[in-house]
Amino acid sequence: MTDPLKTELLGFALEAARRAGELLRDGRPADLGVAAVKSSPIDVVTEMDIAAEKLITDYLAAHRPDDGFLGEEGASSEGTSGVRWVVDPLDGTVNYLYGLPSWAVSIAAEYHDETVVGVVAAPMRGETYHAVLGGGAWLAGGGPLRCREPAPLEQALVATGFNYVQPVRAHQAEVAGRLIPLVRDVRRSGSAAIDLCDVAAGRLDGYYERGLNPWDLAAGDLIAREAGALTGGRPGTPPSGELAVAATPAVFEPLQRFLDEAGAWHD
């Protein structure tokens, strides 16, 4: 892939994320309610998730009609260009539903199955994070992003998330309970994309979660890696729905090993 194409894709991703972020921030109805549920009655979709995904896909398709799409709210097409957009129009839907500020728009561009561009816009923070494969990670309007300086696991601030299926949540709580005595502390923001960007920005030493989807991971994983973090799943595997881990190089291996031994990847 040429650098001009990466630059073009980044520009479109930034603009689509900006527009969707403004829609979500400024257009949130006072009586916002649940439009549908997914994996369980507490795994919700709002009308704004659907509207934001339509805005993003319409914008990108107008400028790059031959690209494919994979979106959380149903956008799916193969395309013929080799480029596929992986879109989470509203990562942190439950936060958004409750009026909490930790939610984001996540857009990644893949080229022949490799993520080459990632953008995560967090409008309530006034921050947009972005990365191009091989080009580093950046805070829009700011400087480069770098993960934290090396520190051992016992001094690490680690974030995680919980699934919306009850038996999975119960097991995840057990794993987190075993981890807490081994680290500085554990956080739970409710947005995988923001947690991955916080690893990139040096606000967290590590993050892990089971049950993520490609749209949860694609942009934030690239941003974290380009900021110097290591990412993966179980030892020797890439991040996936089974397990996703992102951390500073000093924390990654011991955290990954603990999670594997604790069975964080299964019930």
Image (cartoon, helix red, strand yellow):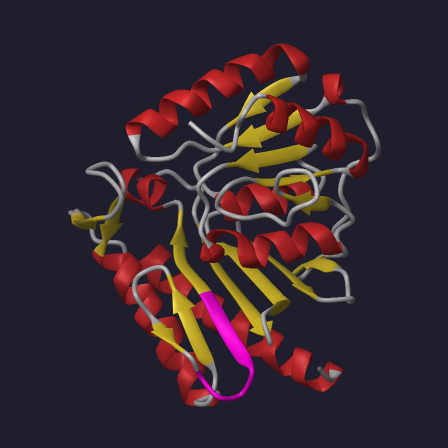
Query: Which residue is outermost to the top?
Result: 181
Residue at left offset 36%, top offset 55%: 25
Q: Residue 236: tell me if it is visible.
A: yes
Question: On the rendered structure, is 89 left or right of 157?
Answer: left
Question: Considering depth in this image, is 181 or 236 the residue closer to the camera?
Answer: 236
Residue at left offset 19%, top offset 38%: 41
| 156 lies above or below 136 | above
Image x and y of residue 207, in percent: 60, 35
Is residue 173 part of the magenta span, yes or no?
Answer: no
Q: Based on the displayed image, in which of its 4 quarters is residue 243 positioned?
A: top right
Q: Based on the displayed image, in which of its 4 quarters is residue 152 positioned?
A: top right
Q: Which residues are magenta?
A: 79-86
Question: Considering depth in this image, is 77 or 247 the residue closer to the camera?
Answer: 77
Question: On the rendered structure, is 138 left or right of 168?
Answer: right
Image x and y of residue 36, in percent: 18, 51
Q: Residue 204: tell me if it is visible.
A: no
Query: Which residue is outermost to the right?
Result: 150
| 134 lies above or below 155 | below
Image x and y of residue 63, in percent: 47, 88
Residue at left offset 45%, top offset 84%: 79
